[in-house]
Amino acid sequence: MFAQNNNKQLEQSEISLVVDKIIISGNERTEEFVILRELTFSVGDTVNSKILFFNRERIFSLGIFTKVKLELNRENGKNTVVIHIEESWHIFPVPFLDIREKTLERTSYGISLKYKNFRGRNETIRATVSLGYDPFYSLQYENPLIISSADISFYFTGSFGTPINKSPTLEEVNGSEFDFKNISISTMWGKRLNKANNIFFVLGYSSIIAPTDAINPYMASGTATDDAVSTGFIYIFDSRNLRQYANRGLFFQLDYLNMGIGSSRINYNSVNLDIRNYREIYKSLIIKGRISARHTFGKKIPYYYYSRLGYGYYTRGNRYLIREGNNRLLGSVELSYPILPEWNFAIDLPLLPLSLTRTRIAVHLNMFADAATVFNNGNRVLLNNFNSGYGLGLTFLFLPYSAFRIEYAFNEMGKGELLIETGISF
């Protein structure tokens, strides 16, 4: 009923052999090219256990398998790499509940219907309905290889919503909370240069409508409606082994977006930088660090586009402190040690397919410290303007499906708070 696997076994041997053949088994839906394009080796290359382990994690990072195993077999004088995979369930609803600022009055809830590995080509179709405090409806399509001959990917997102205003300044101007109306369409074409380097071209359209005349002077156009065509690029370097929870590798992302191309009234920009590094320092003890920065500039930057702390970006210990400005800086460092490195859980239940009752479980103990600030263009970055936090926590992984964290953090004033969050820290 249950199975447990030690993920260090694959890394211990140092034998190197030349690959004569690659065989994939267990892929009932998934086309072989989806797996093969993730490998850093091919027939004729020399591999060892460390290379096989790294490639095992790369395949698992696709997010469509519950188990991946690589074996190197030698028969009749030939070296064969056998890739065993177990596919995850491909279509399922994902309910969510987001309680903001510790009050049920500011709770968003809904459901996301996800169809993963559509047609066996690692495509994803996702429809989301979010109700409550911050309602929206969205449809997404992701295709990592839409043109195979040129290694081109394609992504589409369309959404409609009435997002709550997140700017303290605009709330003060209006005299109360209010909602915008937002319609947006975004497309992205990508080119994989090699296994680690990717570039993307972004083209989109958005219409943001203010509900009252008091907000109009703070819109990019100076009117109630900001209609803008956006264009930009994204560059990503990613050498991490396991993207869902890396313990080795480097992640670097730089993106630029211009809003208002072709418009005489709207013209503003943003640049985002995200750098993350992961290293093992001693016997499974991992140190990881992150630097994130956002800079906005242009003719007139609307307040809804400002950089903020307190929503997707925050220091643990100041989770619900909201600050805004043109620019944001955030840094984090974290020590992580696996209490349960890996447990391939499987249970047989009547009427349910095995792909629904299998998951890769891990539990990590974390010690962390964060610091962040926001500031306007033309202002100096001052150390006493940073918020900071530190603490301990546990991260629970149920891969490839989900993860959540339980953390206790103290801010720079020594005040503590308990955090229960979905996903990983970084």
Image (spheres, rainbow, N blue to C red):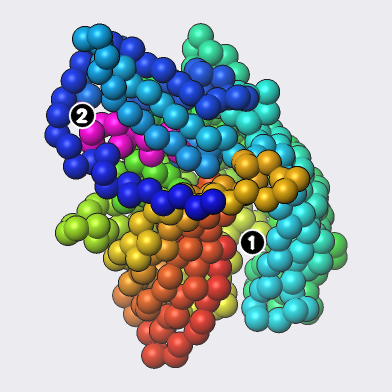
Q: Counting other residues with Cα less than 10 Å from the Cα at mark 1, is it few (<14), some (14-19), or many (20 or more)?
A: many
Report the side of 266 relative to 82 (left or right): right
Q: Counting other residues with Cα less than 10 Å from the Cα at mark 2, is it few (<14), some (14-19), or many (20 or more)?
A: some
**Most prominent secondary structure in the magenta stretch?**
helix
Q: Position of residue 377 (x, y in %)?
A: 46, 60
What residue is shown at x 21% (from left), y 16% (from top)? 18
What residue is shown at x 57% (from left), y 77% (from top)? 320
What residue is shown at x 74% (from left), y 74% (from top)? 106
Q: Nearer the viewer, residue 188 or 229?
A: 188
Name the residue carrying label 1.
303
Range of magenta residues:
48-60
- Rendered image: mark on residue 48: 2
Looking at the rendered structure, the secondary structure element under dot 1 is helix
Measure how far apart labels 1 and 2 are at the Cα level. Answer: 54 Å
The quarter of the rendered structure image containing the C terminus is bottom left
Q: Is residue 367 visible?
A: yes
Q: Nearer the viewer, residue 224 or 425?
A: 425
Magenta-colored stretch includes residue 55: yes
Q: Nearer the viewer, residue 86 or 418?
A: 86
Check disc 2 and give the amino acid type. Asn
- Image quadrant where residue 250 sits: top left
